[in-house]
Image (cartoon, rainbow, N blue to C red):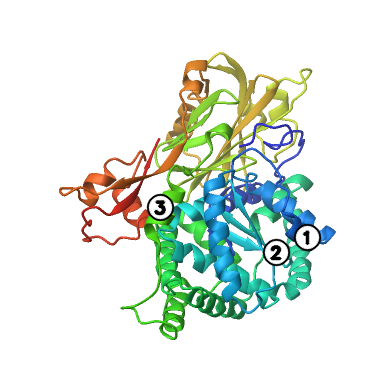
Amino acid sequence: MHSRAGGLSRGTASVWRRLGAFACLLAAGLLLAACAGMQEPSTAELKASTPAPAAEEAMTPAQRKEHERLVTSYGGAYNDPKLQAQIQQIVTRLVAASERPDQKYRVTILNSPAINAFALPNGSLYVTRGLLSLASDNSELASVLAHEMAHVIANHAATREDQMKQAVLVSRVISDVVNDSDLGALALAKSRISLASFSRGQELEADAIGVGISARAGFDPYGAERFLTTMGQQANLKSSSMNQSASGEQADFLATHPATPERISIVMANAREYASPKKPGERDRAQYLAAIDGLVYGDDPKEGFIRGRRFFHPKLGFTFTAPEGFALENTSQAVLGASTTGREALRLDAVRVGGDQSLAQYLSSGWIDGVEVSSVESLVLNGFPAATAVARGEQWSFRMFAIRFGSDVYRLIFAARELTPELDAGFREAAETFRRVSIEEADNVKPLRIRIVTAGLTDTPEKLAAKMDVQDRQMERFLILNGLQRGDKLAYGEQYKIIAE
């Protein structure tokens, strides 16, 4: 949730005209597909980076616009000279071993917890810090970068124009149910259809080319298999924490890649053409871990972060706790949430409401259909003027709150398949957790980071997992983060990743 003007859906006078579309869009933000696998919206400050001269010279106006949109939508560029130099070294080795050693590449690290990577036809490569945190050695990262380079080498972007036409069609479909051009554009941007959504055949071809490039560059070609396995485990962990039905529908609709098990078997076969599993090539694990030590993990606190069910925004100065059973997702436009049952959802965003209009009037003003006028109520939440109301549709019902906080009005909207008295009471209790944070609280906020630790003689996965500053499923997250399986033992003197402040 951005703190800059223009974020938080500010200034939009109408949002969802059709209540069913509202609930669908709530769920749509929770699991999204893109080139390297799964994608999560970013939350860091919007900063468009300037590409290096070599990439800039080859960039058309359309590509420059795409570059700026990509960087902006993924939270800006992440500045880490040490890590940038490490990635550039890997790219240099890959380029020399590729089918196009004359092609120039420039990598931008995106300040996003997403696990994703992209490529533009001119050789601009993008990798998120979320993906960097998931990789465990140079060969795994090399497999991702080589895959993206393969899209450039094979000229897969030649189908771009047709995909953009498809994206425009999807935009029109969205606009039929969303009576707001800004939100329609947001839904389209989130779908990432306009990004490198290559065909199944192109993805498999890029996998094959990428494995070859990595192997010829001296990297372990089995790095692709390991990273795809880890990525699949992370996807399963995320989907099990989120709305199963909603995330499943979204993944099927936006699927642009072969199923992970199929990709794994194919890249394994490709790797065997270059190296034996017993003599695979370089992994450079220690060098890679040293480069990512201290990397910001998850949400950037500058623009709000999530700890369990709690959302905390030190810059805007407020916090909010979702009801029991909810998982939250922080996006650039709003905080989204869904229950594990898939029958409840929430959205928290902000708008500007003129001082001449009361909050009760605003809730009744028609920005959402089905409002029960008799349910509109003015109230005070933790000292802030507020109003609440109920709206009902054919499949979903809504408990809405409008809270005036500073110059903005925050909309906290809960959706439920069936708004029972018990659920409604729970939604009201959650709304009452919206409060101002103190300066001391805001000053004490620190981002979570990847920390590299060395295993001692008595260390076990359970012991290191217990040191993780995460709210839930510490053991699962530790295993995935380090590419381990249940039952694996730690090697004395070996380095491992944990998450800590």
Number of on-image labels:
3
For this rendering, which residue is in front, 274 or 173?
A: 274
Label for residue 289? 3
Separation of marks 2 and 3 at Cα, in angstroms: 28 Å
Position in image of residue 472 (x %, y %): 34, 43
- Reading the chain from its start, which is encountered first: label 2 or label 3? 2
**Counting residues from the N terminus, which is met first, the one under dot 3 or under dot 1?**
1
**Gap in angstroms between the C-alphas marked 2 and 1:** 7 Å
Q: Residues within 10 Å of mark 2 (few under 14, many from 20)?
A: many
Residue hosting label 1: 63
Amino acid type, callout 2: Leu
Residue matched to label 2: 120
- In the image, 150 versus 162, the foreground residue is 150
Q: Residue furthest left?
A: 458
Picture quarter containing residue 116?
bottom right
**Element type at mark 1:** helix
Residue 31 visible in the current orientation? no
Q: Secondary structure at mark 3?
A: helix
Residue 447 x %, y %: 47, 35
Q: Residues within 10 Å of mark 3 (few under 14, many from 20)?
A: many
Q: Residue at x 63, y 76 (%)?
A: 199
Residue 46: x and y in percent read 68, 40
- Residue 302 vertical position relative to residue 477 in the rendered view, above or below: above
Residue under the image location 69 percent in, 41 percent down: 47
Three-letter residue code for mark 1? Gln
**Mark 2 touches mark 1? (CB < 8 Å):** yes
